[in-house]
Image (spheres, grey):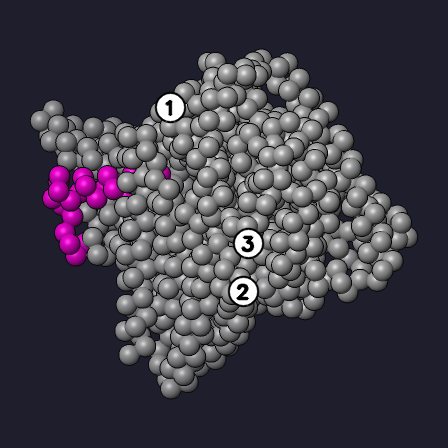
């Protein structure tokens, strides 16, 4: 091959993000008649998720997949996707992540300043809460509870609701629930399935408090050094991969819910009243977000609110 | 002079590790007895590990506390051992110089861009990145000191097995 | 070809006494430069290693066991256990192994375990007429329980590189750890009987009470750590922090056996060991990135999965490779270098990653007591002022018992997996 694209991925190949990269790889290699080779380094063999922004930005590797909010250190406004209940339906999410949307377009532009060009977004689904012995009925259900979170914003939200946020890595999740290190867990449905969390938690509350997105980025200098033809092949494959995973996301999530049910989990959808209480509890988080993300934060937040 | 400074840094590293232990103990107590986890204990103790490990490194070289395999070298004559040791120190020097240079680039980029860690405390990212450049620069100097010492006929320190 | 060249370069560097951390890191960096990859990966790998929260457990567990070591807990522990089992056949040997087992539950390191118990038990046993080689072998092997019974630094590192749960690994080490403990005890009793070893007098209740009270802190700590880990009260790093604080409080204000000078030594020693360990992990990470980009682990995995299709065949190959490596490699680098190469193949064959981690730790234990490079041999050699050859020949029977345990673990995976997943 004339050109090698190396992609760093945190998740294993069998995850839906891995399969999505495989689709991209196949299309690129086929369309370029093998002139472009795509190598996927899955399961964080090269970089952990959090290291991807620096690794791709500096050109240490050509491409990488990172959770969007890993860019929070460079572009604090990306946390708009973790603002509790802001993008809580698939319809709103689709509007927000459209390539020219007033939420996504300014974020892509801001990420470009880090030396990385966004190729495509990978849908991962909404965040849910896991518990034992009944659902979490509104923020009152979190009072005095130890809650596993995976981001700063979620931590702020849990604190605001009266719970104790605890950062626990994906790999320690299972045992932390099993042994009661934390009482409640926040995660995505895909994680419930891949880690078989139904063995240790019995209830899912579909709070949809955050929309989890991953982005596939390419080093800008490297990208600009490609021929038009190469860029064309890669961009087309990227768009196809993006559409494919977005369209399949609800089916993937539905399957995960079904499997959770089949394994004895109860799925609880919050009532209208509970949702109102959840939203009320989230207000301080919105204020904090607006206070420290400047004009860009305000711009994307207001755009998201209008969906 | 430099060796006193390295020993001082080694003590600083030792104290940083103890500090990490104290902060994490406080965290466990705050979490289990008061359901009030801190937002700073985990991150600051991580910084203690980062700075401590890198600041303790040059002293560990001088004291030969880095784990090394001497099963073969000890079969050689003292002169040959000295030659091999000089070559080994030269390898460390080359490695350290390169890591210092590239580590500085990482620090400088984060510093210039104002990148933050994006974690609960949201500290500047360079706070964790700077010690790589500092630690390896000191290690490079220490490697040169070792080479000069060996050329002047200083004995190879025996070190300790961990 | 690349694989052979890499191996040759690595051996050359290591045998030229380049410290393991810089040999691995330097070779990795050189490979990155030669292969046209970005050298930025080297400092990035170092940062990534140091940023591991789980690795904070390393200095803290070391602090705990060094504080206990300097406070003379080894003496009290050995005296207490002897008071209870000393009159059995081979009583002192049994007491030694049990002391190793208890200390293993508060220390993550084999070397610390061998040194702490060895300092007390070796002179005692030799005075009472035990065969020297047997004593050396017993202590060198008994010390290796330190990394199988939780906490365990190699398990922390295995969990760190594989993203597997360290708590599950810890819990999975308990079963095989107890099995090994029992084998060592039975062997000691039979050995002492057959060797005509004189029995010790039975201690009275008053003496037992007195000795037990003195050793209570160590036992309480061991129970605190294991039950804290088991109940889910602590993450591994928190368990280490609590253990550190508890050891400080118990030996300091409560028992008043820790002097200021001893504390300073404990703190400084922990720093030195931590720096050495963490840098090896960082060096191995650079090396790991380089060989991944050269697709070496992928190729080896493929070769293994294509060439070997039975579980038994695979485990035999793994065992052979680790034993040979273990002759000359130090324990941590073995875990760090071989895990990325072997684990993908193990997973492809359907092995449980936690089970595989425990199996590797048993192989690492063997490496610690096989000459020419075996840290536990060196420790016993220096504690007992003995010759390396004497120590090395004494470990042979214990090595066989470790193989037996490995074989049982292979046949019966639940020896490891029952406690974390089925209890
Ligand atoms: Na242990
Ligand atoms: Na060995």
Label 2: element kind: helix
Label 2 lies in what chain?
Answer: B
Residue reaching furthest to the left: C206
Expressed as whole percent of the image width and height from the top left, the position of residue A112 reads: 66, 56
- Residue depicted at x 11% and y 24%: C205
Indicate whether A45 appears above or below B62.
above
Residue for badge 1: A143
- Calculate the distance from the C-alpha at mark 3 to the C-alpha at mark 2: 11 Å
Residue for badge 2: B109
Give the foreground label among 3 and 2.
Answer: 3
Whether residue C198 is visible, yes or no, is no
Image quarter in which the N terminus of chain A is found:
bottom right
Residue A74 got which mark? Answer: 3
Residue C176 got which mark? Answer: none
Indicate whether B78 appears above or below A175.
below
Q: Relative to B28, is C206 on the left or the right?
A: left
Residue reaching furthest to the bottom: B152
Circles 1 and 3 on the same subunit: yes
Expressed as whole percent of the image width and height from the top left, the position of residue C201 reads: 16, 30
Whether residue A150 is visible, yes or no, is yes
Q: How many marks?
A: 3
Expressed as whole percent of the image width and height from the top left, the position of residue A236 reads: 83, 47
Image quarter in which the C terminus of chain A is found:
top right
Label 3 lies in what chain?
Answer: A
Indicate whether C195 appears above or below C278.
above
Circles 3 and 2 on the same subunit: no
Answer with the quarter of the image where residue B135 lies.
bottom left
Which span is picked out in magenta?
C238-262
Expressed as whole percent of the image width and height from the top left, the position of residue B54 reads: 41, 62
Q: Is residue B115 magenta?
A: no
């Amino acid at each position: 091959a004339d050109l090698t694209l190396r992609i760093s991925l945190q998740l294993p190949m069998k995850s839906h993000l891995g399969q999505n990269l495989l689709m991209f790889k196949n299309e690129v290699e086929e369309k370029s008649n093998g002139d472009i080779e795509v190598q996927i380094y899955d399961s964080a063999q090269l970089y952990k998720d959090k290291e991807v922004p620096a690794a791709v930005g500096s050109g240490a590797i050509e491409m990488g997949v990172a959770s969007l909010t890993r860019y929070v250190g460079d572009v604090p406004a990306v946390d708009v996707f973790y603002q509790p209940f802001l993008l809580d339906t698939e319809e709103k999410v689709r509007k927000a992540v459209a390539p020219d949307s007033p939420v996504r377009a300014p974020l892509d532009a801001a990420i470009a300043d880090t030396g990385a060009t966004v190729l495509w977004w990978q849908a991962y689904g909404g965040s849910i809460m896991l518990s034992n012995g009944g659902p979490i009925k509104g923020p009152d259900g979190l009072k005095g509870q130890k809650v596993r979170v995976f981001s700063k914003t979620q931590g702020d939200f849990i604190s605001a609701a009266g719970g104790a946020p605890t950062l626990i890595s994906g790999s320690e999740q299972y045992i932390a629930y099993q042994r009661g290190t934390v009482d409640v867990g926040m995660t995505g449905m895909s994680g419930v399935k891949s880690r078989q969390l139904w063995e240790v938690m019995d209830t899912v509350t579909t709070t949809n408090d955050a929309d989890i997105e991953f982005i596939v980025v390419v080093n800008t200098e490297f990208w600009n050094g490609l021929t038009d033809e190469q860029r064309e092949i890669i961009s087309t494959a990227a768009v196809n991969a993006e559409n494919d995973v977005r369209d399949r996301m609800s089916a993937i999530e539905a399957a995960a819910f079904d499997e959770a049910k089949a394994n004895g989990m109860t799925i609880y959808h919050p009532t209208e009243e509970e949702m109102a209480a959840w939203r009320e509890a989230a207000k301080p988080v919105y204020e904090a977000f607006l206070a420290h993300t400047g004009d860009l934060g305000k711009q994307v937040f207001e755009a998201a609110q209008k969906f | 002079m430099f060796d006193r400074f390295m020993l001082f840094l080694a003590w600083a590293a030792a104290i940083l590790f103890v500090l990490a232990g104290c902060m994490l103990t406080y965290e466990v107590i705050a979490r289990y007895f008061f359901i009030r986890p801190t937002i700073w204990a985990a991150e600051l103790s991580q910084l203690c590990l980062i700075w401590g490990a890198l600041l303790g490194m040059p002293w560990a070289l001088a004291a030969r506390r880095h784990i090394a395999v001497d099963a073969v070298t000890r079969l050689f004559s003292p002169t040959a051992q000295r030659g091999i040791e000089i070559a080994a120190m030269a390898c460390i020097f080359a490695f350290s110089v390169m890591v210092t240079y590239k580590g500085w680039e990482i620090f400088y980029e984060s510093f210039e861009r104002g990148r933050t860690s994006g974690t609960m405390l949201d500290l500047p990212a360079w706070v964790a990145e700077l010690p790589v450049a500092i630690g390896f620069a000191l290690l490079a100097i220490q490697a040169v000191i070792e080479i000069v010492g060996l050329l002047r006929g200083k004995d190879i320190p025996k070190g300790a097995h961990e | 070809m690349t694989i052979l060249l890499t191996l040759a370069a690595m051996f050359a560097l290591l045998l030229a006494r380049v410290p393991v951390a810089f040999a691995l890191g330097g070779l990795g960096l050189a490979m990155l430069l030669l292969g046209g990859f970005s050298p930025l990966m080297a400092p990035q790998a170092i940062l990534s290693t140091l940023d591991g929260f789980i690795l904070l457990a390393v200095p803290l567990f070391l602090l705990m066991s060094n504080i206990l070591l300097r406070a003379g807990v080894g003496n009290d522990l050995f005296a207490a256990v002897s008071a209870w089992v000393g009159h059995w056949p081979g009583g002192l040997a049994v007491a030694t192994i049990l002391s190793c087992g208890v200390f293993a539950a508060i220390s993550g390191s084999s070397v610390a375990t061998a040194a702490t118990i060895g300092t007390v038990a070796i002179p005692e046993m030799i005075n009472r007429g035990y065969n020297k080689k047997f004593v050396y072998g017993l202590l060198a092997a008994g010390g290796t329980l330190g990394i199988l019974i939780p906490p365990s630094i190699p398990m922390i590192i295995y969990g760190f590189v594989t993203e597997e749960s360290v708590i599950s690994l810890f819990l999975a080490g308990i079963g095989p750890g107890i099995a090994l403990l029992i084998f060592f005890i039975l062997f000691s009793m039979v050995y002492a009987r057959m060797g005509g070893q004189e029995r010790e007098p039975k201690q009275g209740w008053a003496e037992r009470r007195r000795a037990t009270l003195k050793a209570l802190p160590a036992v309480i700590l061991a129970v605190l750590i294991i039950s804290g880990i088991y109940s889910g009260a602590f993450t591994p790093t928190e368990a280490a922090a609590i253990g550190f604080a508890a050891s400080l409080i118990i030996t300091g204000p409560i028992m008043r056996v820790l002097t200021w000078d001893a504390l300073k030594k404990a703190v400084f020693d922990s720093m030195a060991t931590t720096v050495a360990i963490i840098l090896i992990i960082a060096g191995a990470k650079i090396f790991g990135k380089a060989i991944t980009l050269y697709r070496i682990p992928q190729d080896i995995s493929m070769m293994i999965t294509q060439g070997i299709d039975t579980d038994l065949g695979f485990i035999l190959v793994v065992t052979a490779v680790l034993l040979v490596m273990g002759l000359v490699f130090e324990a941590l680098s073995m875990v760090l270098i071989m895990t990325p190469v072997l684990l993908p193949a193990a997973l492809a064959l359907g092995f449980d990653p936690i089970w595989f981690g425990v199996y590797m730790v048993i192989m690492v234990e063997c490496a610690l007591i096989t000459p020419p490079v075996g840290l536990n041999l060196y420790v016993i050699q220096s504690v007992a002022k003995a010759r390396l050859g004497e120590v090395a020949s004494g470990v042979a029977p214990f090595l066989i018992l470790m193989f037996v345990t490995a074989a049982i673990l292979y046949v019966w995976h639940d020896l490891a997996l029952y406690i974390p997943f089925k209890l």
